[in-house]
Amino acid sequence: LLLLACQEQADHALQQGWQHLRRSRVFAHDTFEPGLVVVTFAVCLTGFYALDRAVSAGCGWLATWRVEPANLDMTPWAFEGASRLKQELFWYLGPLVAFDWLYPRRQLPLEAPSASRLLLEVVACLAIYDALFFCCHLACHRVPWLYRHLHSKHHRYSATRACETIVLTFWEQALDVACSVV
């Protein structure tokens, strides 16, 4: 609603940002998108870990969402964390770099889309990604071979923690990236 009320200002700001990105050497670099994804992934992983710590400690209103006993032992996760983080980042970055190599990025058009069109496209892409990911995840649970050979690593811990959502095999990471690229 706010976007509709300020459509002209939003379009103008978007066009200015668009022109800045077109001139940016960092944005034009081939590794910008995979690099941005890795940085975002690391920030999210840190957020998951902080959320797990806060929920397990029963911090304030977060105690409502606790599904595990108070003061859940985070030692196993912290102990494995550094090596697992490197592995997960490599497994996530590898397919991204492959897709970037197979499908080189195109040059941005001269004119930016309207802010409302950009918002619609982002929402549509998120919905499509979520639907594809849901179907793939459901298949990993319903097809015994996929669960055994692809997905069971994701469920190896008995404690329910946010940080375990990213414990995936290489092929699951590749599938996740494929859902993102589509």
Image (cartoon, rainbow, N blue to C red):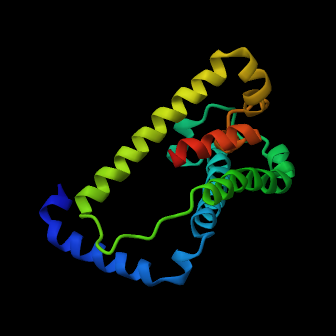
Tell me if residue 131 comes above or below residue 140 in the rendering: below
Q: Quadrant of the N terminus?
A: bottom left
- Find residue 51 and report its horizontal and vertical position in percent: 61, 50
Q: Quadrant of residue 153?
A: top right
Say left or right for 165 vs 111.
right
Residue at x-position 76% and y-position 27%: 152
Residue at x-position 85% and y-position 54%: 83
Tell me if residue 95 comes above or below residue 140 in the rendering: below
Tell me if residue 92 comes above or below residue 104 in the rendering: above
In the image, farthest residue toward the left: 5
- Find residue 179 and report its horizontal and vertical position in percent: 54, 41
Tell me if residue 48 comes above or below residue 30 in the rendering: above
Q: Quadrant of residue 5?
A: bottom left
Residue 158 in view (yes/no): no
Q: Quadrant of residue 148?
A: top right
Report the front residue among 97 and 137: 97
